[in-house]
Image (cartoon, grey):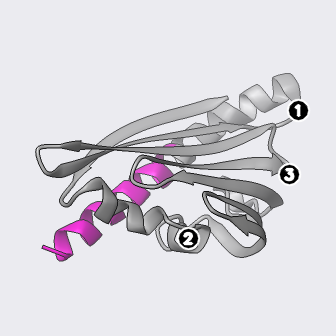
Amino acid sequence: MTTVRLRTTLSGSPAETFRRFESVFALSEIKKELRLARIARSEAGLEIVDARLRLPFFLRPAARLTYSTIPGASAELKQIRGPMAEYRWTYSFSEIGGITRLDAEAVVRPPLGPLGFLLALIFAPGVKRMLRRELKLLERLSATRQ
C-alpha cells in the first residue's frame, strides 16, 4: 500500500479554497488523473461517479468512485468498484490566521496481494508526484487570486 501525506498553506479562507472541491467536476480541474467523469448519482455532500483513472505507467482503468464533502472542512474521493484494492484521496481544510491549511492524503493499494505490494513500491513515486502537482497547482491558483 502506498500512503502519501502532504500539507500546504493557501491564501484565503477554507470556504474560498473549498470552492475548488465543491463537486467532482471542480476537483477534476486540479486532479488531472480523473478523466471522463460522469455522475451516476448526486445529492448534497455525496456524488457517485464513473470515471477513468490515469495512474502511473499509462494505466487507465475504469472505476466507480464516491466523492463526499463537508463544505469548508473536508473532501474525500474513494473507489467503491474498480481495479484497485484501495484508492482514496482525502483533503482536510483548517484556518490558521486568515489562511487555509490543506492536509492531503493519498492511499493507493494495488490488487494481487504480495505482487500488489511490489507494485505499490513502484507506484509510490508516481502517487507522490501526482499529489505534489495538485498542491502546487492549488498554490498557484490561490496566489493569482490575490
Query: Decide: marks 3, 1 in contact (CB < 8 A)?
Result: no
Picture quarter containing residue 25?
bottom right
The tag earlier along the polypeptide, 3 or 1, is: 3
| Residue 18 is covered by the magenta coloring | no
Q: Residue at x 17, y 51 (%)?
A: 99
Q: What residue type is labelled 2?
A: Ser
Could you give the CA–CA distance between mark 2 and mark 1, rounded to whole angstroms?
Answer: 28 Å
Residue 8, horizontal then vertical, whole percent: 28, 46
Q: Which amino acid does label 1 sit on?
A: Leu
Q: Read off the magenta span.
A: 128-146
Q: In front: mark 3 or mark 1?
A: 3
The tag earlier along the polypeptide, 2 or 1, is: 2
- Quadrant location, the N terminus: top right
- Write down the residue under mark 3: 82
The tag earlier along the polypeptide, 2 or 3, is: 2
Query: Decide: marks 2, 1 in contact (CB < 8 A)?
Result: no
Q: Residue at x 47, y 63 (%)?
A: 21
- Write down the residue under mark 1: 112
Nearer to the camera, 105 or 111: 105
Disc 1 secondary structure class: loop
